Image: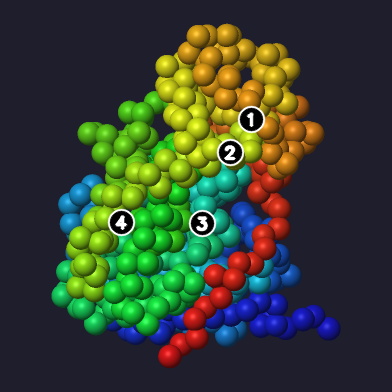
């Protein structure tokens, strides 16, 4: 006899505890058809949903029949936010909702299953609440490669084509439709706090802050209101600084770093316009509607710090402004430490003296900026440092390593030991670099649009999966003590 669905995973419904002022119960769209295009089997297996049949998968992630024990009805979340630094009080989940919550059996963390393209909500603002199939394809590719490059990102969990014709100004129309489900560690955004501050709802802010600590940072809990508020803010700042550093090391440009797109857990999500760099370019912009480069690659840390300052303003009723400001002052050093770690992790090198590691990371990006070496090529060639000297010397990019600009980087690579996780014997490092440039995405999409030919898409996903395995991303995770929730009062 098949195992009952409800016995396969640990369901939760904690977001409801915040109260109806934080969300709107909504009905999912009814789609003409359901064709599964992507199923994240690795993460489905991890969280206990890997055994769902095709029909069960469509039922839960295409028709959005509730998962037993979790939310009984989808919730469109309420939030505000600054969009390109202009405040917008008319935001909220306009084409998505929180579908379910559950617990990760590996690390105990609370997980959200949220949607994109699941229909209209009270916050749709005249939109149709739908997602193009191309948009869904792009998001799956982004999250898979970001995960492979060790960026803490939402996971594209399911992509189902839905059989509608959509009209868009930035795609040839009519175009095909889809609904995406993503797996995230929280959908609580800076904009969630901003909405309550805008409404002068101090009680709601206190409830949201305590909820965030209880379920996402339980190791910070203190009976002292001011102390736990400051601890929460410091952790949120550290999370976001780490995310920005991981973007930098991955050569990733988000495109729309609005305050409603930044979560307290520092998990990258919501991929509309994005790009991976072909080469280091601090001024590179992903979104065509960002003409002044507010969210350019080199300005992403600045944008994240600006958003965190808005979060700090929301917390001023509960903590000293001077102490909140002091925490913000720590963003840059935290970013520098995080970037050193992310850079050495990508290179498969052991970390050593912190000051030296930070300086080395600076030399790396200075060299990449001056030389304009292909971004991913550098990290591929020098994975393991001195252990890869022979491969680097035989690389198509070897001429870059003979430049005087490379001397400090080369010295730093050779003096550091390869990390145990470098995994240099993996077949990936005997092949070619795995990239995802805009022309590659367009080349993958063209045969899908013209002939429903998904072979290139599957080949790219297999290539990304090999890279993820080579970089150790698929290794098991040990559950930390800090992931255990604080019991409700």
- In space, the residues marked 3 and 2 are separated at their CA atoms by 30 Å
Q: Secondary structure at mark 2?
A: loop
Residue 356 visible from this viewpoint: yes
- In space, the residues marked 4 and 1 are separated at their CA atoms by 32 Å
Select label 3 or label 2 by which is in front: 2
19 or 327: nearer the eye? 327
Earlier along the polypeptide chain: callout 3 or callout 2?
A: 3
Mark 4 lies on residue: 327
Earlier along the polypeptide chain: callout 2 or callout 1?
A: 2
Mark 3 lies on residue: 154
- In space, the residues marked 3 and 1 are separated at their CA atoms by 32 Å
Q: Are marks 4 and 1 in contact (CB under 8 Å)?
A: no
- Residue 352's label in the rendered image is 2
The quarter of the picture where the N terminus appears is: bottom right
Q: Secondary structure at mark 3?
A: loop
Earlier along the polypeptide chain: callout 3 or callout 4?
A: 3
Mark 1 lies on residue: 416
Q: Residue at x 64, y 38 (%)?
A: 350
480 or 12: nearer the eye? 480
Task: Report crowding for label 2: few under 14, some 14 to 19, many 20 or more residues within 10 A (C-alpha).
Answer: few
- Compared across the picture, whether 293 is left or right of 438 comes to left
Q: Position of residue 231 (x, y in %)?
A: 37, 67
Q: Secondary structure at mark 1?
A: loop
Earlier along the polypeptide chain: callout 2 or callout 4?
A: 4
Snapshot quadrant of residue 397: top right
Q: Position of residue 46 (x, y in %)?
A: 68, 65
The quarter of the picture where the C terminus appears is: bottom left
Q: Are marks 3 and 4 in contact (CB under 8 Å)?
A: no
């Amino acid at each position: 006899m098949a195992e009952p669905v409800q016995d396969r995973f640990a369901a939760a419904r904690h977001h409801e505890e915040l109260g109806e002022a934080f969300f709107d119960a909504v009905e999912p769209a009814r789609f003409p058809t359901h064709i599964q295009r992507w199923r994240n089997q690795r993460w489905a297996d991890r969280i206990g949903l890997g055994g769902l049949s095709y029909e069960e998968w469509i039922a839960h992630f295409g028709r959005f029949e509730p998962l037993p024990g979790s939310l009984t009805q989808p919730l469109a979340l309420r939030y505000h936010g600054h969009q390109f630094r202009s405040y917008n009080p008319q935001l909220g989940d306009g084409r998505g909702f929180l579908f379910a919550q559950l617990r990760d059996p590996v690390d105990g963390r609370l997980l959200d299953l949220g949607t994109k393209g699941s229909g209209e909500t009270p916050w749709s603002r005249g939109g149709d609440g739908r997602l193009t199939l191309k948009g869904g394809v792009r998001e799956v590719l982004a999250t898979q490669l970001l995960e492979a490059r060790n960026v803490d990102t939402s996971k594209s969990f399911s992509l189902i084509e839905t059989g509608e014709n959509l009209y868009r100004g930035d795609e040839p129309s009519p175009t095909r439709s889809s609904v995406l489900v993503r797996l995230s560690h929280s959908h609580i955004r800076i904009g969630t706090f901003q909405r309550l501050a805008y409404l002068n709802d101090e009680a709601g802010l206190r409830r949201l802050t305590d909820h965030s600590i209880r379920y996402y940072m339980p190791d910070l809990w203190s009976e002292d209101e001011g102390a736990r508020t400051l601890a929460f803010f410091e952790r949120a700042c550290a999370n976001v600084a780490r995310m920005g550093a991981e973007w930098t090391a991955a050569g990733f440009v988000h495109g729309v770093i609005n305050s409603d797109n930044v979560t307290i857990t520092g998990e990258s999500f919501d991929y509309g316009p994005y790009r991976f760099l072909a080469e280091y370019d601090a001024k590179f912009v992903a979104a065509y509607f960002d003409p002044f480069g507010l969210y350019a690659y080199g300005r992403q840390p600045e944008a994240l710090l600006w958003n965190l300052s808005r979060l700090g303003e929301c917390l001023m009723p509960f903590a000293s402004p001077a102490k909140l400001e002091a925490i913000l002052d720590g963003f840059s050093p935290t970013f520098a430490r995080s970037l050193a770690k992310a850079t050495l992790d990508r290179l498969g090198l052991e970390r050593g003296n912190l000051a030296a590691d930070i300086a080395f990371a600076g030399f790396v990006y200075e060299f990449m900026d001056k030389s304009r070496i292909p971004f991913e090529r550098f990290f591929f060639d020098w994975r393991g440092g001195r252990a890869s000297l022979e491969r680097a010397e035989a690389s198509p990019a070897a001429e870059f390593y003979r430049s005087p600009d490379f001397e400090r980087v080369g010295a730093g690579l050779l003096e550091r030991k390869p990390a145990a996780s470098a995994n240099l014997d993996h077949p990936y490092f005997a092949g070619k670099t795995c990239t995802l440039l805009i022309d590659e995405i367009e080349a993958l999409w063209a045969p899908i649009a013209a002939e429903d030919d998904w072979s290139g898409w599957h080949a790219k996903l297999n290539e990304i999966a090999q890279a993820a395995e080579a970089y150790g991303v698929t290794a098991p995770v040990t559950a930390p003590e800090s992931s255990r929730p604080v019991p409700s009062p």
